[in-house]
Amino acid sequence: MPDNPPAGLTDEEAAQRLRSDGPNVLPSVSRKGVVRIAWNALTQPMFLLLLATAALYALLGDLGDAGMLAASVLMVGGLSIYQEQRTERVLEALKDLSSPRCTVVRRGRVLRIASRELVRGDRLLVNEGDRLSADARLLEAVGLQVDESLRTGESAPQGKQAGGADDDDEADSRRLYAGSLVVRGDGVAEVTATGAHTALGAIHRSIAQLAPRASRLQDELRRLVGRVAWLAAFTCVVAATVFALREGAWTQGLLVGLTLAMSLIPEEFAVVWSVMLALGSWRLAKSNVLTRQPQAIEALGTTTVLCVDKTGTLTHNRMALAMLHDGETECTPGAQALTSRFQGLLRGALRASSTGGVEPMDHAVRVTAQVAGLDGGDAGWTPGPRRGIRDGSPYVVHWWHVAGESGRTVAVKGAAEAVLALCDADPARMQLLRETADRWSVAGLRVLAAAEGHAGQTGDDAALPDGLRMSPLGLLGFMDPLREEVPRVIEECRRAGVRVVMITGDAALTARSIARQAGLLDGGDAQVLSGKALAAMDDEALRRCVREVQVFARVDPAQKLRIVRALQQQGDIVAMTGDGVNDAPALKAADIGVAMGRRGTDVAREAASLVLLDDNFASLVEAVRAGRRIFTNLRKALGYLFAVHVPIVGVALIPVVMGGPVLLLPLHVVLLELLIDPACSLVFEAERAPDDSMTVPPRPRDEALFSPASAARAFAMGALVFAGVVAVQWACRALDATQEELRMASLGSIVLGNLLLLLWFRGAGLRLAHTNTVFHALLIGVCVVWGLLTAVPGVGRIFGLPSAPSPWALWVVLPAGWALWRLFAASRNQ
């Protein structure tokens, strides 16, 4: 990054251009408007069946029932539209959270903003790993190479440079385009176009219309719905035919068939999937975990290994310069005044650090230098080329020209063992520096060495010339403290059967120290493996030892990919964190790739299925808990849906099999659907995770969402409720109940059975130790509706029930009072 970025726009200018040009986003072709949502809802099978039934009533001359069914059409359609809009709002909010971020200069301040806030004229700081979200013109560039394959199809990175006029033949080499990836170098650019006006806007529509791949859960639900739909169609045709032939009334037979179809159609399956996953993703976002792919929620509950970085994930990523050593003695900055000897070490480290940017250790050096009064610069020292860390060269190189001296002076800062290997000095001093570096690493410090040298000219690409030997200036020890919650969270993972593995680029001794503080190690050297030792292993040897290793140190990105694959070949389900461009292959290969939201590059976020918005390991573990909760509740909801249809279908079939009056009318099915839809989606989505959710092993990866055994248990529970309904019918018929009273008994017993099934599947056989406010609110609503049907004169007649008030209506006071008491108790405990 250039040391002196231009001043950029003022906040007022940026706000004005944002208002005039709009946000820097491409037009959404996937967002559903109200009309599209309404059309999708009103063409659902349930809606069409209601229309057909209303038309049949109208043909029969029963305009009252036809009108009620028409009103129910609006109710069911309105509920579907509401739920779809709520899901759409959640998805749009998640889309805003997943918007990439960029670094700009405004009024001389370096700001990190959402890319949607970019405007024309913004000064954009371009760094390696950035995915550009606007078109721009380069003002400054240092070794900049850009992958423009998204726009041009060319896989080779294109070199970019600043300067010159835009209308000459090489103007394209000075332009950056939205959608391009910076693969090397950095620079400063001026934004020239945003949103739909960028080059990417021309191809956005064709890309945006590509449908995402369905997840395993979606495929499983689709197959389940298809099987049930075919079974429903066959059952309805047979039932309608049998009733019509026996009773001699084809119109009534058609009505029976339509009612049975309405009770069998599993349209709630799609509702429960979309609502629970959308709201589940929103809950994860509130826990600082952004879900970019629904498959991640499915896989979270199966995770067996969490591969995490140390810096910023297990630690705070707030580096402070804690120790200095000049080869003879050491001191603590701040605890004592720096002598001229240590000032020389600090000056050398400052020369090797960038004067801007946010690199933690460079920032720590600058802060310490400011405290020591060394931030004014060195008179006569002119900065020259800089070279960042490269593979095989874990140090930075900064060349300087010193007035009055021939040649150039180079300042180097980086990994202690690598920098000291470039130096020549007294053997005793070199030995003391190496021993001190080891001792500091054991104590948990991040150790860097600084050195200076002289050469006639720089090497290629600002590298060190061959054979150059330098003088060691000393060591710098940095401390990045462990996050306070990490030991507790790692112990929680251990109880949940999830193994935590640290993969870091730090030295083995530093990694071991942090791992011991975090509780990852219980002693023994075999649990730590260095990148050098890993490089000497073949894939088979790595597979044999990967389960015993808790810490991988001095690991490069290519080795991360090997570790992930080795764990997967051992049968583990791997979630891995990453933040750099080179981490993208490993993030893609992992079952769940987790990108860092604060310090991660846009490429890492694109490759990942989750993004930790706060870079905190505890948030990742919370995501595992949430993933287990979502899968468990989705399974409960499907079990409830399967069970609740059994008594409804059974009551609809009673007149077909046994004769007698039709007990379940289409309006009754509508009332039951208004209970089932919120129950299966909102009630179960609001259900908390079981108390033992993080004390049981992860579920197997290939475990079915709704297995035949689960279906059998759900059918058994539904059959038990149906048996209760039949017993009520038998008792009522023994008492010579009227046709309307039989219908009221059947509807009431089904509603009661639904509520009992809700309680059963919520608890899944366990004691309910918490209050689900949605369930209790639903229970109160059901009691109010039942009270209106049975206690208010004339209301029951509309639904084919007795018009006179029933003494049984008073019983609703008991469940309603219980629900109110639970809600009141829950509000007092908040």
Image (cartoon, rainbow, N blue to C red):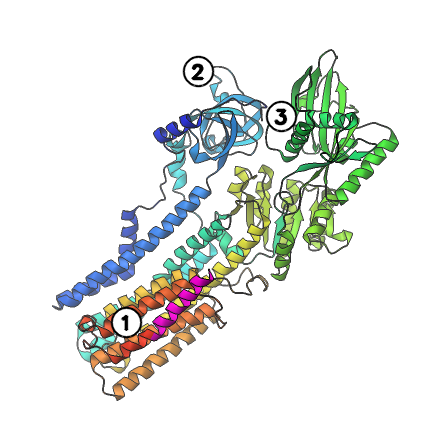
Q: Residues within 10 Å of mark 2 (few under 14, many from 20)?
A: few
Q: Residue 491: which numbered mark, if any?
A: none
Q: Residue 488, how many percent across, how many down? A: 63, 56
- Does the CB distance between marks 3 and 1 fall below 8 Å? no
Q: Secondary structure at mark 3?
A: loop
Which of labels 3 and 2 is toward the front?
Answer: 3
User: Main structural element of the magenta stretch: helix, strand or loop?
Assistant: helix
Q: Residue 355: which numbered mark, if any?
A: 3
Q: Which residue is mark 2?
A: 167
Question: What separation in Å lies between label 2 and label 1 (alpha carbons)?
Answer: 77 Å
Q: Three-letter amino acid code at disc 1?
A: Trp
Quarter of the image where one finds residue 519: bottom right
Specify start and end residues of the magenta stretch as a single range: 814-830
Q: Three-letter amino acid code at disc 2?
A: Asp
Q: Secondary structure at mark 1?
A: helix
Magenta highlight on residue 558 = no
Residue lying at 25% horizontally and 77% vertically, measured from the top left: 744
Mark 3 and mark 2 lie on one chain; the one further toward the N terminus is: 2
Residue lying at 70% horizontally and 50% vertically, measured from the top left: 515
Q: Residue 590, how many percent across, how many down? A: 58, 49
Q: Three-letter amino acid code at disc 3?
A: Thr
Q: Is residue 435 above or below residue 171?
A: below
Q: Residue 786: which numbered mark, if any?
A: 1
